[in-house]
Amino acid sequence: MQLTVLGCYAATPRTLTNPTSQVLEINNHIILIDCGEGTQVELRRHKIKFSRINHIFISHLHGDHFFGLPGFISTMRLLGREKELHVYGPKGIKEAITLLLKLGDSWTNYPLLFHELSSKASELVFEDSKISVATIPLDHRIYTNGYLFEEKIGKRKLNIKAATEYGIDKAYYQNIKNGKDVTLDNGEVIVNSKVTFDPPKPKSYAFCSDTVYDESLAEKIKDVDVLYHESTFLESELELATKTKHATAMQAAKVARDANVKTLVLGHYSTRYKSIELFKEEASTIFPNVLLANDGKTFNF
Amino acid sequence: MQLTVLGCYAATPRTLTNPTSQVLEINNHIILIDCGEGTQVELRRHKIKFSRINHIFISHLHGDHFFGLPGFISTMRLLGREKELHVYGPKGIKEAITLLLKLGDSWTNYPLLFHELSSKASELVFEDSKISVATIPLDHRIYTNGYLFEEKIGKRKLNIKAATEYGIDKAYYQNIKNGKDVTLDNGEVIVNSKVTFDPPKPKSYAFCSDTVYDESLAEKIKDVDVLYHESTFLESELELATKTKHATAMQAAKVARDANVKTLVLGHYSTRYKSIELFKEEASTIFPNVLLANDGKTFNF
């Protein structure tokens, strides 16, 4: 699982900081999460092929999380895209994009499919043989969802060494890969697990931005491998955080601790602070494994 | 008159090229012309104060000319703007911006005034004591206007040396500045022009993008000082230019020549060409004074 942070700063794009957008590579899916202004340029900068992105998940309709989407969708048309593009986001996103394209008389020539969200309960919004994606309802100033991305358990892999030792003929290998046991000529049954490796443990990633501190969030993302939780502010601005329905680094750490996540990634920083290291220092006082998102940074999990 | 080109490339924003946006400083007005994605970051990069911009003129509603506008308008709110912002652009622009802000529950806290255009004839859309702005109807794939910015003739300036030589008392200086003649104690009348300098010749700027080659355009922009005319293509792509309702560098030069402009600035280049110098070479074959716009370039006229 690989996470590339295209932008992780709050409010407005600046010369050195981008608004929220991330690319998550998970089980061969390339997923775009949020799409602030400038996202398409950051994708180019990181040489991520637009054509590999088939699913876009938008958390909420504040500009710093979706004003790059109309341009991205338009560029896909100019690049000659033909395959489906799925956009998941709050109700209203379809009307907005449709209106902008209509005004430019430039509707897409590829199928653009909107999956509009309005439920306040978690929903499974995408699933295939490789991953599932569910919403994580968040409490922000407007209707907002985080997203929980989970790998499906993969197939067991053939252990050629073990199979050879048991004297199993290669003709049976496909059966073994398909999970079957093998009966030897002498009648002995070799159970599948003896000639296969366990599949890699499925990974999970929870994207939670933007949100006020919410104690109940931990329950919804229990035991995830990686939690990206917004930390717009430090505890010194707790009152402002609460008022604007954002969280502090300390609060993000509390969620990570209570949810028993493996790794916490902080982001969505206000640009008022001198160094983002301050966020890590604060969060690390109560949760050990804290990473700092930053524009252009790639994490491998 | 100063023109700062924030972006002058066609189609989509890229790592090294920006879509259309310009800042025109004319007679103490700071005007934003078009607002492709990324414009607000380019404004920051060039240290142009957002608060000094009170008028935005949008040519047409293709994304590369206005997808940066929602973000710019939102940022103005975050920066605490209080004074009016006037946006001129095709009918529909108000609905688009209003919808985007409404979805984010983030209406501006400053007066945002739209001046929607739908006439196919030239209209005077702004005028004060310093400048006037009129539309230049263009022929593109969707409803499009160029804009003609013209300085008003300024006041004559006091020529202190001449006034002293005539022995005029300082008490009369304000009258002279106001255009009055002066009667000396001996009854001699000193006409105003003898003790004043001519005001600077008023400058004019015509922004024409996007447009197909239109012979009749020259008549509408006769004798302007500076013409910015799109040249998406070279003559080798004349057919494509005509089909997509864009112009070639040669065609831009024809308009400049027929309109008897002083300076032609080329821009809105397709990124298919190796060097933008090719545009200048082509245009220079029939018009002498050709400048090339480029992102970040500032021209003083």
Image: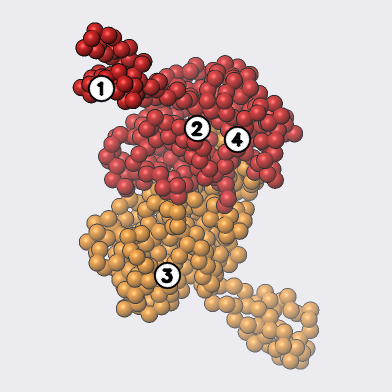
Chain colours: A orange, B red
Quick check: can you spot residue B117? Answer: no
Looking at the rendered structure, the secondary structure element under dot 2 is loop
The chain containing the residue under callout 1 comes to B
- At x 22%, y 21%, the residue is B169
Q: Residues within 10 Å of mark 3 (few under 14, many from 20)?
A: some
* Residue A253 disc label: none
Q: Name the mark nearer the viewer: 2 or 3.
A: 2
Q: Which residue in the protein does label 3 denote? A: A292
Q: Earlier in the sequence, mark 4 or mark 2?
A: 4
Q: Which residue in the protein does label 2 denote? A: B301
Looking at the rendered structure, the secondary structure element under dot 4 is strand
Circles 1, 3 touching at the beta carbon (< 8 Å): no
Circles 4, 2 touching at the beta carbon (< 8 Å): no
Q: Residue A261 sits in which quadrant? A: bottom left
Q: Which residue in the protein does label 4 denote? A: B291
Residue nearest the viewer, comparing B178 with B25: B178
Q: Name the mark nearer the viewer: 1 or 2.
A: 1
Q: Which residue in the protein does label 1 denote? A: B173
- Amino acid identity at mark 1: Tyr
The chain containing the residue under callout 4 comes to B
Circles 4, 1 touching at the beta carbon (< 8 Å): no
Give left or right: position of A1 versus A253: right
Q: Residues within 10 Å of mark 2 (few under 14, many from 20)?
A: few
Name the spot of residue B150 as percent of width and height, x first.
44, 23
Q: CA distance from mark 2 to mark 3?
A: 48 Å
Q: Residues within 10 Å of mark 4 (few under 14, many from 20)?
A: some
